[in-house]
């Protein structure tokens, strides 16, 4: 067993992890990296398997902090979704990741990928380059590298992701999946006890245990991502209630649960992942109702805030890009079905208003405009490659009204579908030729 860069004080067989990564790479002809908990690459297999775009970005980027942060975020997502996660990197290339866990602590991850799954979006690509502070003169060359990136199909991705997950299980200690940071808990208990002593010397503070002002202050702190002040204020509120002889422990728990729900609603308005918040609420609401003493309540409150702020503070910019790529991926896979903004928001676990905003900000078009763009691009392929009528094409790409399809097609291409089809020498039914 080796003590390595992956761990500070946990022994882990790093040689075994490297061997597993090499075997995966040989068997699949795909690259494989091992990253530590800070997103640093500590090992990678044959670098020739990396895509050209990734190689050039590694050379061009002076500071790869954004990419590291992106990897950390998706490692957290993998933990949340049972140990494996498929995601699109800032450049829109598909990757898959599985965490390495020892004694309930994620010490690193296996990551593989950087293949093309969805068509590249130049506007979004250029915005990402701006965020990475890359010079404008590199844009065209890098975008061409993106266009030329090796393609991969969804079934292959699923299989490779499953293999990576099995690898991570093989090198992980999966017998422990819960870890309580006792030192942090003792610190919070100390803060709680200190505040109790202050209250005992000033009875007037005990009576003012809760107010709308404090609730509003909590909401403001939560929206600002200020975890430490949030924790301090809620401990202050709990301490005041605990010292009030007219308030029993059951009432304290009820009030705490009310506060957690209020905070959750507040951050959801900012576009936070709804499933993450709902998962936290369901977990902690049930567990808090079962608690029997104040020490455990303090422990659970701090655990809640650690998880709560993890997704609303550190990864805002990353979540923004991740959300748009997940949306693009979903629309490309489901354009032929009836789709609304609400359907997409539900699929990517965000509010409709937030999804609408990121389409406008990142792609400079509305959700409907982007969906129509995908449908028209797909219809052009069908009109060129298949002996089917415009009416059938309209239906196959998700339009219920042929006349509306023709209108959208002309707005985006400058010609009608019939004109487009016939001008390139493709089969057009006589009935349609006569109407052209």
Image: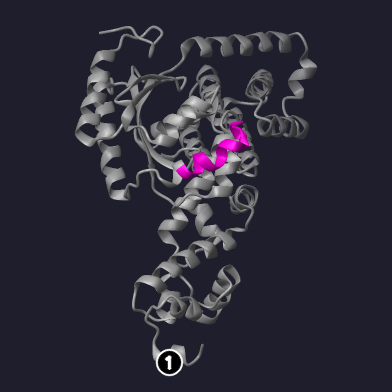
Vertically, is 334 above or below 311? below
Q: Position of residue 252 (x, y in %)?
A: 61, 28
Q: Quadrant of residue 226?
A: top right
Q: Which type of secondary structure does the marked residue at label 1 adopt? A: helix
In the image, is 120 to the left or to the right of 29? right
In the image, is 303 to the left or to the right of 1? right
Q: Position of residue 288 (x, y in %)?
A: 50, 30
Residue for point 29% across, 14% down? 14
> Is residue 427 at all visible to an observer of this figure?
yes
Q: Is residue 34 magenta?
A: no
Q: Quadrant of residue 163?
A: top left
Quarter occupied by the N terminus: top left
Q: Is residue 140 magenta?
A: yes
Identity of the residue furthest to the right in this view: 204
Q: Which residue is mark 1?
A: 431
Q: Quadrant of residue 244?
A: top right
Q: Position of residue 314 (x, y in %)?
A: 58, 28
Residue for point 49% across, 52% down? 328
Residue for point 55% across, 22% down? 62
Which residue occupies the foreground of this view, 365 or 410?
Answer: 410
Which residue occupies the foreground of this view, 239 or 359?
Answer: 359
Q: Main secondary structure of the magenta part?
A: helix
* The magenta segment: 130-144
Q: Position of residue 8 (x, y in %)?
A: 41, 8
Vertically, is 146 above or below 42? below
Density class for disc 1 (Cα within 10 Å; few <14, some 14-19, many ≥20) is: few
């Amino acid at each position: 067993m080796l003590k390595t860069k992956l761990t500070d004080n946990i022994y882990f067989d790093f040689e075994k992890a490297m061997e597993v990564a090499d075997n995966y790479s040989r068997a699949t002809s795909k690259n494989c990296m091992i990253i530590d908990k800070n997103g640093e690459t500590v090992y990678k297999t044959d670098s020739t398997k990396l895509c050209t775009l990734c190689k050039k970005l590694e050379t061009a980027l002076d500071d790869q902090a954004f990419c590291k942060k992106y990897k950390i975020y998706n490692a957290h997502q993998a933990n949340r979704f049972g140990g494996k996660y498929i995601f699109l990197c800032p450049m829109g290339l598909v990757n898959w990741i599985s965490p390495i866990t020892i004694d309930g602590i994620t010490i690193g991850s296996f990551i593989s990928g950087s293949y093309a799954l969805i068509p590249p979006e130049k506007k979004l690509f250029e915005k990402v380059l701006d965020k990475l502070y890359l010079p404008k003169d590199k844009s065209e060359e890098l975008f061409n590298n993106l266009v030329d990136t090796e393609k991969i199909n969804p079934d292959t991705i699923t299989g490779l992701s499953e293999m990576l997950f099995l690898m991570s299980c093989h090198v992980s200690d999966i017998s422990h999946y819960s870890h309580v940071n006792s030192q942090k808990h003792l610190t919070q208990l100390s803060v709680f006890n200190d505040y109790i002593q202050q209250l005992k010397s000033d009875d007037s503070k005990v009576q003012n245990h809760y107010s709308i002002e404090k609730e509003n202050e909590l909401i403001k702190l939560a929206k600002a991502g200020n975890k430490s002040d949030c924790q301090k204020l809620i401990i202050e509120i709990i301490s005041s209630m605990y010292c009030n002889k007219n308030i029993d422990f059951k009432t304290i728990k009820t009030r705490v649960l009310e506060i957690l729900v209020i905070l959750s609603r507040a951050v959801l308005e900012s576009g936070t992942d709804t499933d993450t918040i709902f998962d936290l609420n369901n977990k902690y609401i049930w567990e808090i109702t079962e608690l029997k003493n104040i020490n455990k309540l303090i422990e659970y409150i701090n655990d809640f805030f650690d998880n709560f702020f993890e997704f609303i503070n550190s990864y805002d910019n990353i979540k923004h890009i991740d959300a748009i790529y997940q949306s693009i991926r979903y629309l490309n896979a489901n354009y032929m079905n009836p789709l609304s903004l609400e359907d997409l928001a539900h699929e990517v676990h965000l509010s409709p208003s937030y999804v609408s905003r990121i389409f406008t900000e990142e792609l400079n078009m509305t959700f409907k405009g982007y969906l129509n763009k995908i449908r028209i691009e797909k219809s052009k392929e069908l009109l060129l490659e298949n002996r089917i009528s415009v009416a059938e094409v309209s239906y196959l790409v998700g339009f219920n009204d042929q006349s509306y399809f023709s209108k959208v097609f002309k707005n985006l291409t400058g010609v009608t579908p019939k004109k487009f089809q016939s001008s390139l020498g493709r089969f057009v039914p006589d009935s349609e030729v006569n109407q052209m």
